[in-house]
Amino acid sequence: MFLINCPYCGERDQSEFTAGGEAHIVRPKQPTELSDNQWAEFLFMRKNIKGVQFERWNHTHGCRKWFNMVRDTSNDKIYAVYKMGEKPPIK
Amino acid sequence: MLNFNTPIIGTKEYSEIKISEIEPILKINLRGKNRNFITKIGKELSIITPVDPNTSSSNERLNLLWLSPDEWFLYSNDKIDLKDANLLEDKLFNEISKPKLGSVTNISDHWIMINLNGAKVFELLSAGCPFNFNNFKNSKGTVTQTLLNHIDVIIHNKNFNDLNLFVRRSFSAHLWSWLNDSARFI
Amino acid sequence: MNKNLRIANNKFIDQTTRISFKFDGKTLYGFKGDTLASALLANNIHLVGRSFKYHRPRGIMGCGSEEPNAIVQVGNDASMTEPNSRATEIELYEGLEVSSQNCWPSVNFDVGAVNNFFSPLIPAAFYYKTFMWPTNFWKLYEFFIRKSAGLGKSPTEPDKDIYDHRYLHCEVLVVGGGISGIMAAKTAAKNSLNTVLIDDKNILGGTTLFQENECFKINNSYSNDWLKKEIESLKSLKNLTIKKRTSLAAYHSYNYLLARENLTDHLDLNEKKDKIRQRLWKIRAKKVIIATGAMERPLIFNNNDRPGIILSYSVKKYIDYYGVKCGQKVSLFTNNDTAYETAISLSNSGVSVNSVVDIRDKTNSLIVKQAEKLGIKIHWKSSVVNTNGYKKINSIEIMKLSDDGTAVVEKKIKEKCDCLGISGGWTPRVHLFTQSGGKLKFRDEGNVFLPDKTELDQISIGSCNGDFELDEVIKNSINLTNKFLKVSNNDYENLEIVSSKEIDKKNIWLLPSDKPFGKTKAFLDFQNDSTANDIKLALREGFKSIEHVKRYTTTGMATDQGKLSNMHALGIIAETTGVKIGKLGTTTFRPPYTPLTFGTIVGRNVGEFFDVIRKTPMHDWHIENKAEFENVGQWKRAWYYPINNENMHEAVQRESKAARDSAGILDASTLGKIDIQGSDSSEFLNRVYTNAWSKLDIGKCRYGLMLNEDGMVYDDGVTTRLSENHYLMTTTTGGAANVLSKLEDYLQTEWPELDVYLTSVTDHYGTVSICGPNSKKILSKVIPNLDLSNKEFPHMSFKNALIDNIRCRVMRISFTGEHSYEINIQSSFAKSVWEKCFEAGKEFNITPYGTETMHLLRAEKGFIIAGQDTDGTMTPVDLQMDWIISKKKYDFIGKRSLYRSDTIREDRKQLVGLLTEDPKEILEEGAQIVAEPNKQPIEMLGHVTSSYFSPNLNKSIAIAVVKNGKKLKGQKMFVPMRNKTINVTITDTVFLDKENKRLNA
């Protein structure tokens, strides 16, 4: 069970959150102009790294806000949490 | 006349814990993002809009709880007269939603208010709530949204060992039963 | 009780309170404060069980949680009996009943013991190797193996005990109440840190508590007396919570720990009632101090498993703490100084000590000198090569060790004894540290794995960190604690400590014997019966990794997770293969540290609280009217309302007919409802639904289909425009929470520029749906002043109204194809409105109907249920709902996916209707549809998604998905079932009222 520092509410138990997959995948502004392959790239392709990964999380049972997290998937260490629209504090 | 029904009726007392359903309570959800919205609700309600996370403001009539950076929960201190159930909602709707400052939604029956009172209320909550109440319980007016026995709740630290807990109506009978089952072991 | 085995004066056991208990049906007596193990030993009972594989007699070996042998079945009640309990951890209480495990017919005469004679034929992995072929015979083998294997008996009825869970948040958690833990907890609490100290025993103090020996003194007091004062001083500390009888089960990342507190296990039978038996503490600690101590190691030599062979420090605890003599003539066998402490204790208590057999050449530490002074005989540089005695040890055979320690030499000496205390050194309890993800390092001195790197805010102190001498334990523990907590506690600065130092160290993992290696039986894992031979065999057969050897030989895989055996297994592997132990690594220690009952894991989430239940405002009415309920997500929904002795089919047929013939009433309160406000609300709906919303007039309702980005149908529902910038969206019952979360996601991440606010109002409104040709008449009675004419209030529109001055919203929408209305009113009044409608409808025989009838009625009309007729692979085109996709809109969620090469395939599975050749034949939902039933292999073209007998059409109808179904209308298909093949025809999905005449009837 992680302890997640919600950027809005502070430290909370993991059970209050849901994970939402890889972060920083922007929905194309003009989907109609994309080829099948380009659209598939957005729709299906995810990195699923063993190591440091950028993820989306939702504080489902708290403020209901979505935010981003930098987490090492190999040891579950959370390096940073930051609000949507903000640049990741770590590369 | 239509009958008013609540899912739970009454009060239960245990050693150092009293659990009571308190209804009808007026509850309104307020959402908005800009400064105008925040000053407007402050003005309309004569209350300072709490902008710090997990806090609230209260006056003689009302409590305004911070839920998220763009969402607040308003509830009345006392039971309301059903005749006047829509007065404040209409006023706020006209002043806030209509001029496109934000949203005003009556949620009086979406939530049921349960008052928890007594020296052992936090022990009771620890039976099913992962939230850390250590600091929360020592400062009046704190607010948290969390899970209690897997059910979403809003908890308002009204006064020392005097909490108002809000649970969605459909879950309330179940949570009530769980609270009572837990309280007998405290 | 055998008086000769009890010491009269004892500080810890209340010898004035006698307790009776039953062991294998025989009534025995012990004292308050005894464990089952100490009480059995006081009754001269050593043999408590049979070993797993060879059914060899086994006795009590230790005094704590690492006990491998003395595991028993507690109780004989079918609901509360508990297998695999360690006798060393069971506190004696009045009424305790236990029995031996793994033996038949009795522990003293066990038929399975014949295995012992065939043991050369049962090597490691015997079962794997033998029962592999012939393959078909496994069923036969399994029957016999299951019968003879396994440990205790599971309870056969639900557990009557009550269990509980609690969350606990603290700044410092100290695990282990020995001398290190006590000092650490005191330091933390004195420095205003909110501290919790847990210990699995019923008394704090660890092993120091009964260390009363001249060689171990603190400030001129015996170490135990000094510690007692420290324990006493904890009582005055405000910030300290002490939990005894609480054992740490698991240590997860982020300092999240689970601990099991035993609340009633030690109470007399009649005091246990109506109390919580065990509580699982879910602890979140800022900092964790592990002070779990160390376990004494056995020695590995021939026949080292006989009853009466006990770890030496346990022998000491039984005499010093419980006042119980493990024997009258005790021998000791050691490779370190520990056994001398035991020898001195025994000697001081009047037990005759035959000798200490020590593998070391000679040593002169303080404690050894003290033993010598007491006249205790020592066999230096010697080893026990064999033990004798079937059900209990009666003698040992001693020989001198060769200089290199690989062989035994000279004359064999036989020594009579009734107990052999063994000590192979100490193993730090690093289990919790490794559970938490910490990495270990190996220290050659003492051959121990010690905590090394960790990502968490934790330290290990005391002997679990490799300090075994009293002065080191004290000094290092306090230094580490001060540094870790960033505090300074000077209480322990100038302590004067006397501590015997171990000077000489020697270790032989597998002790040599005078017999050929293959003829010896030197047990490593006592509970799983694996021997040193098994390990060597596995290595000969090519297994190299410790994890593989472990699984092949099952070493360390019993209920004790090899607490005593793992180090020796590693040592023997290292010696045999020539790899250093540090390089081999250890096996993974997994939670729980000691077994937990399922009850503890489940807590109070049983019975009524097994799952969360949601109820609608009308729930009580449904109960009063004998409804059967269906679970829809967490909701309890009225399923059907049987009258007299109707079964479900009969009730549904009646309800369906009534709804179409006159009037029906349905509780639709569970539908998700989202209040949408903001100046961009229309644009928002345009983006989330497939159809267009900008032109929807105020006061009108529209059905919408929501897709995932992959183009597949996700949810559906009717949305109403309440005013210019105000909508009320409904979602499916099951999809409500997810839809709201998904919409919030888009608003917060993709379209933050939109001025839209969503608020869930699902529970705020109760929804009463009345349908049927008489619904209008009924509504006009309930709300007399509302104009219900088709012109004023047409299908797909809404009106604000008042019922007895309470506001409500009435939508004229229909999921049944009938003329119908949905009244949304504050939940507090919903039951009352429902009753009012029911009363008003009585003259029209208004019939309450449940979800089953609702499903049937909508199927007659070919309306889909998202989640029943769709499964995440159906596009709107597949559903033949092309009409709902706006061609004009530039974008909406999932639009681009609707013309991917895969989604425009014509031969996708598409939604169709099915009619059976025999109108009385009802298809099974999920049944497969084929075109050529005789073809091999048979090609599945699709399956039935919904199927009912329609009372209004008087025939069976079904909805299905079929490959290329759109083009197959009128085609004959087959539904092969177990006993027959059903002939069907593909049809349109709308079976009733294709012209929608009934909507305005």
Image: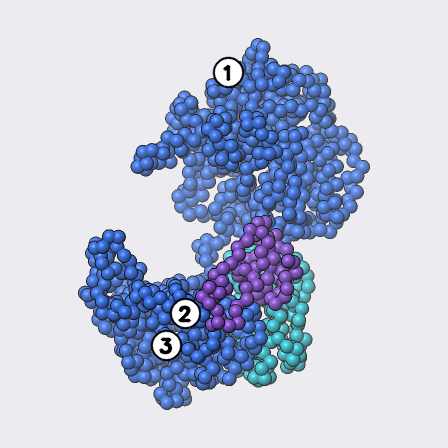
Chain colours: A purple, B cyan, C blue
Name the chain under label 1: C
Q: What is the residue that sits farthest to the top in this orientation?
A: C411
Circle nearer the viewer, 1 or 3? 3
Marks 1/3: CA distance? 89 Å
Secondary structure state at the residue bearing disc 1: loop
Amino acid type at circle 1 is Lys
Circle nearer the viewer, 1 or 2? 2
Asked whether the residues under marks 3 and 2 belong to the same chain, the reply is: yes
* Residue drawn at the location 35% of the way across and 87% of the way down: C790
Circle nearer the viewer, 3 or 2? 2
* Residue drawn at the location 67% of the way across and 43% of the way down: C459
Marks 1/2: CA distance? 80 Å
Q: Residues within 10 Å of mark 3 (few under 14, many from 20)?
A: few
* Residue drawn at the location 40% of the way across and 75% of the way down: C885
Task: Depth check: give the residue in front, C81 or B144.
Answer: B144
Amino acid type at circle 3 is Trp
Residue C870: horizontal and vertical position, in percent? 37, 65
Residue C481: horizontal and vertical position, in percent? 72, 43
Relative height, residue C78 to residue C770 (above, below): above
Residue C831: horizontal and vertical position, in percent? 42, 74
* Residue drawn at the location 60% of the way across and 80% of the way down: B101
Q: Quadrant for the N terminus of chain B, please.
A: bottom left
Marks 3/2: CA distance? 16 Å
Identify residue for label 1.
C515
Identify residue for label 2.
C899
Identify residue for label 3.
C883
Asked whether the residues under marks 1 and 3 belong to the same chain, the reply is: yes
Relative height, residue C370 to residue B186 (above, below): above
